[in-house]
Every structure is written in C-alpha cells, then in structure tokens.
Image (tube, rainbow, N blue to C red):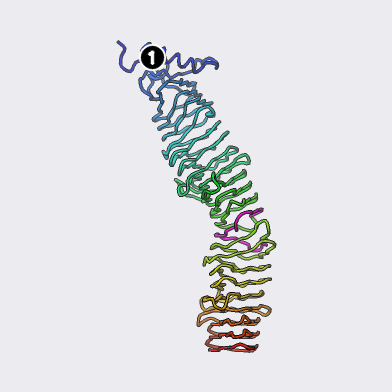
Amino acid sequence: MTPLNRRSDGCRLAATLLIACFLCGTSAASADTVAWDGGGGDGAWGNPLNWSGDLLPGPNDDVVIGAIPGLTVFHASGLTEIASLQTASPLTIGGGSLHVAGTAVVSSDAAVTLDGGSLVGGTWNVIAGALRATSATTNTLVGVAIEGDLELETVFATARVHDGLAIDGTVALTGAGARLVFEGDQTVSAGTFLVEGVLGLPARLAIDGDATVVLGPQTTVHAVNANLGGSVFAPGADTLVSQGTIVVDADDPLDDTVVRWLGHDFVNGGTLQVVAGEARLTSTFWSSAGSIEVGEAGKLRLGGSFTTADVDTIVNAGPPLELVGVLDNRGSLLMIDEAIGTLQLLGGTIDGGEIVLAGGSLAFTPNSGNLLIDPVITGSIALVEPAERFHVAGDLWLDGTLSFLGSGCSITFDDPVASILAGTFLFTVAPSTSLTQNINIANGGTLAIEKGVVLSGGKGKVNGDPESTLVFRGELHHDTPGSSFYVTVGTLLIDGAIGSSAPDGTLWVTVAALTVTGSLSADGATISVD
C-alpha cells in the first residue's frame, strides 16, 4: 500500500512525462534542476514532497513546474531563494518572498499572481504567460525586470515597487483604483504605463514618502482617469520627474476623463500631451522644461505653484488654460500669445511681473479668488460674462483698455493703499441692467486713480465703505444716455476731472467728505451730491 502523502509510481511517471514535455526543445535539466512532481498531493510550494528528491528548491536550483491540469502552486510564507524558474502552471505568491537570481519564464496559459507576497530580483519573461497583482496591499516587486506586461486589472489591484523596475512591455493599471506605488528613490529607464481607471475611482501611479522617481526618456505614460504622483501608504514630499512622454487621452473622445498630478513636485522634462480629456497640474510645485501640448479635445488646468521662468513651451489648441494655482511672475515677462490662446483665472493668482497680451488673451471668471498682485499689463482685457471679477493686491498699471461687458463685473483693490497708475476703463452695460459694473475699494482702504487714467461709459460705480478714500486725479466721462454712474466712498478728493454729459443721465456722488481741487461738472446731465 502506498503511504498517505507519498507519491505513487503512477504519479511519478505522469509528473516526469509532463516535465519532459515542458522541457522539450530546451537544454536538458542540469544536476541542479528541481522539478515539481506533486507527490505531496497539494499545491503548496513549501511542501518538500511536491518536489523531486523530496527537498525544497534552494539558491542553486533551477526550478521547473510543468503544465499540470488543474494545478496552481501556492507560495504561502517564508524566504525562498532559487537560481531560475520555468513554469507552465499557475503560481500564486500569497505570502513570503520568492527570490530569483536569474531568469523566470512563464509559459503560455500560465500566470504568476502576486496576492500578498513579494517577488525579488530576476528577469521575468511573461511574454507568453502573465504576471498579475491582486488588491493585497503587501504585493511587492523588489529589483525586478519584466519582459512582457504587468497586469493590475482588478479593483484596487496593488503592486509596491522597491529598488527599481525594468519593464520591456506595459504596466497595465486598468482596474478601478489600481495602484503602482514606488517606495524609495528609483529610475525607470523604459516601458509603457497604461494608467486607466474610471471616473471617480482613478488608477494611480504613486510615490510614497520623500522619494524621487525618474521616468526616463524611453518611458510612455498613457493616462485616462488617473492620478500621477502623491502617496498611498506613507505621506511625504515626493517628486515625479518625467523625461519621456505623458499622454492624457480618452478611449472615446466623448467620455469624461480627468488626470490629476497629486504629488509634492512634478518636473516635466519631456513631453506632456493632452489629447482628450482634462489634465490638472495640481502638484504642490511643478515645472516644465519640456513641452506641453493641448489638443482641440483636451483641457489643461494649472494648479499648484509654478514660475514663469520654469515653464518653457505650452501650445494650446483647446479651450482656455485654467489657472487655479499660483503663477509666480515676479521679475519675469508672461507672454500670452497665439500659441497659448487664452489664460483664464479660475481662482488663481498671477504674482507680479509684466503680462503682455500678444495675440492671446487674459480672461476671468466669477470666482472670488481671482487675484493679480502688482500687475503690469500690456494689452486690453475684458470682463465678459455676468459677475466676472478679479482682485488686485498692490497697484495696477494697464497699457490698454479694460472693458466691463457683463453685468455685475468688478475689480476689487484689497490693499490699504493702492493705485491705478494707467489705463482706460470702459463701462458698457445697458442702463436698464439692474447690476452696476464696479471698481471696489475693500476694507476702508485708499485708492488713487492717477493722472492719465480714464473712466468712461455708462452704468458703473466706484464703491467703498464709509471709511474708504478715493483720490481721483484722472478723468471720468459719464456719457451713456439714460444711465447712472455712482461714486460712493467715505472721502472723495477730486484733483482731476469728473464730469457727466449723458443725456437724461445722472452722476451720483455719495460721500461723507468732499474736496474738489480739480473739476466736478455736468453738461446736459444731472449731478447729485449727497
């Protein structure tokens, strides 16, 4: 009688034949070859009876698992070191770690699945087979090279990467919430990363801790509903450097897709292409010495903090670039040309420097966070839609015209002392419109409208609270028939010219204190001083 848990001669013969078939066409097994024969009667890697010689494979052994119907080998725990691996049957790493010094070949119809364990070292040839990861958060790759694809295709599929990843193929993060997490400084020299989650549950190419990950010039990231950078298991000041190509796209141009940069730093030294969908550069800090290209079906949102000097080339064929972060333009010249198109503030800030509109435009939204700090603007701008607005910290110098086109549009000066140093301000809203177009003085501040500045048109208002002061050295021409213009401040000092020539119009001056060393006049209109 054959003892329990011992192989029968028939089992030995079957296993031997299967192994021989698997090795057919290859060199004969060496003396160090350890083959799976299944004598233990289970699928446990850690059962010595499942291996030829009834001994577990060791560091000098070439391991062979043949194509055995119904078999899945399961590595459950412990540290296993082997020289090489050939498997034609499924292998699951459910715990512990499998160290491969040389090459691991996964044959057709076989798959190696990470389900809680680690693969350490080796070159894994999975061109004919598969290498997969489940949602187990301890799935780890350490210094692994992959020929073929790494599949993270299930919900929250996870692989953590240490000591670099060499990929000659594709890492497919196509499961909802799938995660490839780099831990420690690493460079990936080549390979394709398909980071494709679903809207609301993006796939993630993440970096834990304070690590820096460099994607080399031969890498391509294809992102659809994805998060790039940022941590999963260990927060920190991570940095993602891309020297290759990142493509934001959608499988169907009509589908919504959002790709976000979540890390502390993002450095684009290659090419960022927004073909379709929306890309949001929202890393805490980011720069681009490479190129950024936005297609007609793409959209780019600029968040985080970045400087004019650190952004080289942006070519935008899509809708307006949306600024939601802080653009440090101090000491620089921001050229908004035809290549950029329109830069639109959506709660964003442009800090200092000169803004030149040379074929492009600067636009605003109703967002109350829109802020220009000490702006010097060459070119004309317009507040087009109802309630569009922006705030100014410091002084405003405008070599051009600011047109108030939408009802309720406004500029607000936030500092205790501020000036409009140059510019023409045109108030165009129809007299019948209920909302005025405003220049506001915030928090009891003082605004000086200097000589050479012209305010003209119809239903406008210079507005402040009872503690505010307006020093007016420019010109106000209220000339739209039937309209009303309002100056409502605490103290008004007129050292320029304020006049109304609007037929059937009224200029309303409501102040607590009025000093006129210039002129306050009406011609065919009414002035009401209160």
Please tell me whether residue 211 is drawn above or below residue 19 in the rendered image.
Answer: below
State yes or no: residue 5 in magenta.
no
- Please report the residue visible at 54 percent of the width from the left and 78 percent of the height from the top: 432
92 vs 51, nearest the viewer: 92
Q: Secondary structure at mark 1?
A: helix
The residue pinned by badge 1 equals 11
Coordinates of residue 385 in the picture (x, y in percent): 56, 67
279 vs 93, nearest the viewer: 279
- Please report the residue visible at 43 percent of the width from the left and 36 percent of the height from the top: 134
Total number of numbered discs in the rendering? 1
Coordinates of residue 320 in the picture (x, y in percent): 60, 58
Please tell me whether residue 406 is drawn above or below residue 104 in the rendered image.
Answer: below
- For label 1, the crowd category at 10 Å Cα-Cα, with few meaning under 14, some 14 to 19 and many 20 or more, is some
Coordinates of residue 299 in the picture (x, y in percent): 57, 53
User: Where on the picture, by quarter, is residue 481?
Assistant: bottom right
User: Where on the picture, by quarter, is residue 1?
Assistant: top left
Extreme residue toward the right, this view? 358
- Please report the residue visible at 51 percent of the width from the left and 31 percent of the height from the top: 121
Coordinates of residue 501 in the picture (x, y in percent): 64, 85
174 vs 204, nearest the viewer: 174
- Please report the residue visible at 47 percent of the width from the left and 17 percent of the height from the top: 19
178 vs 353, nearest the viewer: 178
Look at the image and give the residue range highlighted in magenta.
311-334
State yes or no: residue 316 in magenta.
yes
Q: Amino acid at mark 1?
A: Cys
